[in-house]
Image (tube, helix red, strand yellow):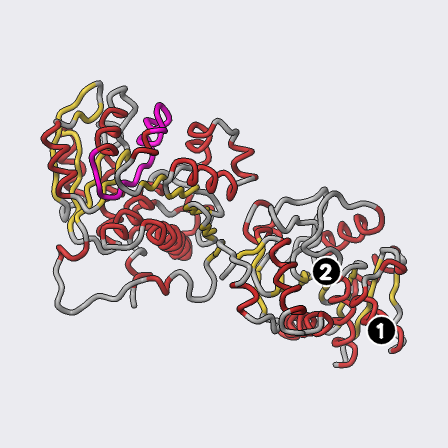
């Protein structure tokens, strides 16, 4: 599913009108019919429709008409200047007047009626909204939120910025949002992710070519995407067909990180997994992951110290290298990472303390011979970029995309809406839940991504699938354990979501 900003969506609508001759009033009618479908499904009989004076309000007026002619008890409110109602909205506004449907604006009457209704349709502000809300609209939105009534928002909850998902001083908290053509960034990011409720995308007769011609590069999980990217396997096959993954990391205090990463990689379908670890932790790791093989290394300053011959053999043998899981922060770790980046032609996934080492010299990424994947959480991204975590969380797409372009790497920025960026390509993932905020969750993700790369997936696609499957596994674990599940529990649900 494509994700559009407000400017792109306006151009898509304009293209449908100018290129294909589809009148904008028909698009509005189709949008209204789409929302009407969800009102019917929720079982409401008495519906309050709150409209603005723009095209979003026009959708609301059309919805009110459909409700009325289908026998619903409907009340319509508009708290804006009725003389400023836009052209297509005006058509539907006049139809309501011809049907003798009163468009009300008395706030006290509104406060009384909302107590008696079954559902509220929010058609106040659309995707062009920015700024703050005041006056009667502020009071009306406050009343709607406090009422506890089921709310269906048209296109996007009023008060949410379409391009950022940031909330105004007040905004609608929707149970369902029905949007048109494409998802918007505001449905997926910041407060918009929570306030949009369940989001449905409806086709209102805009030809798909209108979207393709806009050249949109952003996508999210919806329908069968990205599971449709999963490749089937031939019957005549063996373990060497599914990748040799080397996981470099671990120290005496963090042996579990490598274990989780390796186990997740195996559960994702890797053919061969080798753990490159200090000798001192081999028994702890080995008992948890007996299916893996091991490259045992010396230690320096409490962290792994890999001989040059060992590194050269790893670089020669690997299909993908995962670096940094539980590796520690000794000064020589950056030297190991630099050597691998300078000499490996195979993909490298850098996480955890590997990212902390990278902060000392991130320009080495620009000279890499192979494709690099980094998987920072906002704190690690802050150390890499110098931005505050607040700024990063508020501008996740821009931060990930800018870093990817500057350093020519695939950037997976973890969070409730994980962003995967590679140059102009963007994927925003929405699977997962707060229970995944637990130790080792990132190690599992790195194992999944490395496994997909080792199996021959493109690095960007591997990160898309990895973030999606990781979130699904977390959701399945939540179903069985609530918020008490562990990262080890998550691993057990990875394979379930990889069936063809």
The label number, if any, that marks residue 84 in the structure image: none
- Residue bearing mark 2: 122
x 33%, y 36%: residue: 351
Query: Is residue 480 shown above or below 400?
Result: below
Query: Dividing the picture into quarters, in which one does residue 33 lie?
Result: bottom right
State the quadrant of the C terminus. bottom left
- 419 displayed left or right of 181: left
Front residue of 37 and 452: 452
- Mark 1 or 2: in front is 1
Q: Which residues are magenta?
A: 343-363
x 68%, y 73%: residue: 36
x 15%, y 50%: residue: 272
Query: Dividing the picture into quarters, in which one does residue 315 lie?
Result: top left
Position in image of residue 369 (x %, y %): 26, 38
Label 1 neighbourhood size at 10 Å, few (<14), some (14-19), many (20+)? some
Q: CA distance from mark 1 to mark 2?
A: 17 Å
Label 2 neighbourhood size at 10 Å, few (<14), some (14-19), many (20+)? many
Position in image of residue 219 (x %, y %): 48, 56
Does residue 329 appear in this view? yes
- Residue bearing mark 1: 96
Position in image of residue 130 (x %, y %): 71, 46
Asked whether 5 falls inside the magenta stretch, the response is no
Query: Is residue 466 shown above or below 33?
Result: above
- 82 displayed left or right of 262: right
User: Helix, strand or loop at disc 2?
Assistant: strand
């Amino acid at each position: 599913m494509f994700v559009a900003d407000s400017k792109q969506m306006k151009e898509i609508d304009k293209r449908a009108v100018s290129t294909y001759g589809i009148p904008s009033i028909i698009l509005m009618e189709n949008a209204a019919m789409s929302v009407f479908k969800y009102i019917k499904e929720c079982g409401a009989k008495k519906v309050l429709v709150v409209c603005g004076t723009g095209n979003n309000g026009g959708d609301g007026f059309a919805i009110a008409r459909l409700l009325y002619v289908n026998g619903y008890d409907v009340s319509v409110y508009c708290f804006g200047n009725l003389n400023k109602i836009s052209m297509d909205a005006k058509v539907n506004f006049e139809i309501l007047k011809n049907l003798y449907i009163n468009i009300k604006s008395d706030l006290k009457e509104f406060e009384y009626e909302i107590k008696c209704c079954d559902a509220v349709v929010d058609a106040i502000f659309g995707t062009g909204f920015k700024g703050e809300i005041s006056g009667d609209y502020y009071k009306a939105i406050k009343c709607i939120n406090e009422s506890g009534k089921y709310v269906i928002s048209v296109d996007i909850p009023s008060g949410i910025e379409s391009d950022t998902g940031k909330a105004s001083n007040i905004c609608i908290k929707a149970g369902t949002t029905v949007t048109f053509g494409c998802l918007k960034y505001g449905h997926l990011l910041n407060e918009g992710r929570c306030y949009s409720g369940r989001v449905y995308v409806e086709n209102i007769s805009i030809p798909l070519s209108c979207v393709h011609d806009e050249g949109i590069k952003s996508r999210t999980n919806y329908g069968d995407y990205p599971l449709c990217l999963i490749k089937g396997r031939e019957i005549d096959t063996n373990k060497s067909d599914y990748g040799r993954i080397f996981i470099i990391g671990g120290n005496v205090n963090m042996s579990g990180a490598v274990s989780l990463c390796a186990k997740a990689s195996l559960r994702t379908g890797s053919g061969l997994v080798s753990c490159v670890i200090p000798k001192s932790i081999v028994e702890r790791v080995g008992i948890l992951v007996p299916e893996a093989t091991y490259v045992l290394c010396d230690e320096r300053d409490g962290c792994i110290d890999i001989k040059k011959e060992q590194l050269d053999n790893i670089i020669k043998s690997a299909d993908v290298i995962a670096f940094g899981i539980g590796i520690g922060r000794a000064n020589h770790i950056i030297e190991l990472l630099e050597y691998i980046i300078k000499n490996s032609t195979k993909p490298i996934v850098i996480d955890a303390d590997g990212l902390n080492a990278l902060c000392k010299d991130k320009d080495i990424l620009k000279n890499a011979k192979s494709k690099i994947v980094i998987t920072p959480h906002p704190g690690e991204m802050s150390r890499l970029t110098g931005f505050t975590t607040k700024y990063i969380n508020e501008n996740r797409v821009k931060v990930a995309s800018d870093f990817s372009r500057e350093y020519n790497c695939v950037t997976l920025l973890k969070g409730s809406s994980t962003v995967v960026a590679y140059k102009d390509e963007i994927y925003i993932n929405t699977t997962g839940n707060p229970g995944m905020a637990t130790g080792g969750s990132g190690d599992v993700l790195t194992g999944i991504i490395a496994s997909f790369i080792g199996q021959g997936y493109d690095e960007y696609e591997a990160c898309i699938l990895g973030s999606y499957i990781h979130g699904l596994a977390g959701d399945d674990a939540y179903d069985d354990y609530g918020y008490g599940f562990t990262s080890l529990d998550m691993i057990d649900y990875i394979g379930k979501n990889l069936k063809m």
